[in-house]
Image (cartoon, rainbow, N blue to C red):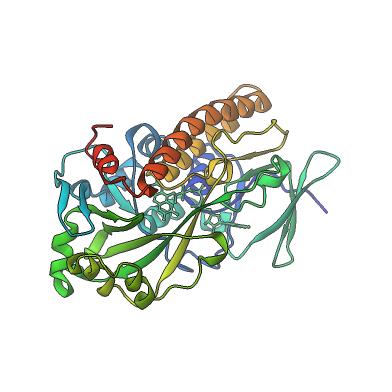
Amino acid sequence: MSKNTGIAIVGGGPSGLLLARMLYLKGVPFTVFERDESPLHRPQGGMLDLHPETGQYAMKRAGLFAEFQKFARYEDQGMRLYDKHGTLVYGNDASEGDRPEIDRSQLRDLLVQSIPQDAIRWGHRLSQAVQLEDGATELRFENGAVEQFDFVVGADGAWSKVRPLVSDIRPGHMGLTMYELSIDDADTRHPEVAALVGRGTAVAKGDGRSIFAQRNANAHIRVYAALPRQEEAFLVETKASLLAHFADWDNKLLQLLHAGEDDVRPWPIYALPVGHSWENRAGVTLIGDAAHLMPPAGEGANLALRDAADLADALTGNGDQASAVRAYEAAMFVRAKVSAGQAMEAFAAGSAEDSLEVVRKRVSGEL
Ligand SMILES: Cc1cc2nc3c(=O)[nH]c(=O)nc-3n(C[C@H](O)[C@H](O)[C@H](O)COP(=O)(O)OP(=O)(O)OC[C@H]3O[C@@H](n4cnc5c(N)ncnc54)[C@H](O)[C@@H]3O)c2cc1C
């Protein structure tokens, strides 16, 4: 089999696509392999706020900041915290701030459109990556395709099939599953829900349970009900069974669930250990969740974008590429360890039964 020229990027999420964009700008050949059949294959989930030093930095480096600004919603940075009785414990509806929101689907579209379309191979789900004796990596896909590359980047998220080339560690379940519901056209169809959520994110907490609601573009509201869950029991919830878990919550908050579409999507929360790292191996590295999956605390996609920008610099610089990739990994390990530690702390505080006060301090900036 003849070896491909250029770099293989496995995964067309935020990290893989941003890396692809930066390689494209530098004229370095690459191919993105993505398991989704097409860009519209599945909903991409809620919204992300991009932080100046990570997500926004990466968009600037990729020459996409002006494009990002077209979608960035500075007006949706508010935060509200309720107890389970529906009492507002903290509220900040300010539209000032430097972490504007963007819907995930908008971010993905923007990144997909920023590279040549024939550089993305949709419908390519990697099943195994094997390092060959000559140092090249063979990528074996579920659709039967087999390709060899000298350099492979794992940008394939939580359950990376590239990760086993450098690390035996697998993510562990965090004892929590988030169930996602969608509310369309909230301003018109559910004005009381829109008023409860405000411009940004609303969180309600009590008894180790939470409901998060985010205002997305076009008056769409995405709701996540978070329940303590054992790994094997995360799948089956309907709207009715979810409502039963929150039976003693105030009716105003339950409107967030009542108003949702019937389709309920589970997001079991997994994480890699804080400080996950590996011995450098020539011809392969990881970015984003593949490298440092952590509980959601607003940093994962931001770090993923920053990793991609830094790795692009390493792969396209004038110096020795192998040393540059080692330097990328060393810096990324340090950055990810700090963020993962903070995410774990926030997660633990958010999961604890008596945590409302701690969460209030966090969202208000007192902690
Ligand atoms: C409920 C929830 C809420 C979150 N909220 C936020 C937030 O507000 N802010 C934030 O910064 N982060 C948030 N995160 C984290 C964020 O989603 C991730 O950190 C981020 O998406 C990581 O980007 P990535 O490119 O590394 O991986 P992913 O976004 O997971 O992308 C991986 C890509 O690889 C593809 N893929 C996977 N396996 C294969 C395979 N075998 N072969 C080929 N392709 C494959 C996938 O289809 C996908 O397109 C949240 C996570 C969850 C679960």
Residue farthest to the right, as pictured = 133
Q: Quadrant of residue 254?
A: bottom left
Q: Seen in the image, is 86 located left or right of residue 122?
A: left
State whether residue 7 is above or below residue 175.
above
For the point 19% across and 69% down, which residue is it?
251
Return the residue nearer the eye: 209 or 75.
Answer: 209
Which corner quadrant holds the N terminus? Answer: bottom right
Q: Point out residue 295 in the picture as x, y percentages from the top left corner.
A: 46, 47
Q: Quadrant of residue 178?
A: bottom left
Residue farthest to the top, as pictured = 319
Q: Seen in the image, is 181 located left or right of residue 13?
A: left
Q: Point out residue 282 in the picture as x, y percentages from the top left corner.
A: 73, 33
* Residue 63 in sight from this viewpoint: no
For the point 14% across and 43% down, which residue is it?
94
State whether residue 107 is above or below residue 98.
below
Return the residue nearer the eye: 252 or 70.
Answer: 252
Q: Point out residue 267 in the picture as x, y percentages from the top left corner.
A: 46, 61
Q: Point out residue 116 in the picture as x, y percentages from the top left corner.
A: 51, 53
Return the residue nearer the eye: 263 or 96.
Answer: 263
* Residue 257 in sight from this viewpoint: yes
How many dots with numbers? 0
Which corner quadrant holds the C terminus? Answer: top left
For the point 34% across and 73% down, which residue is it?
244
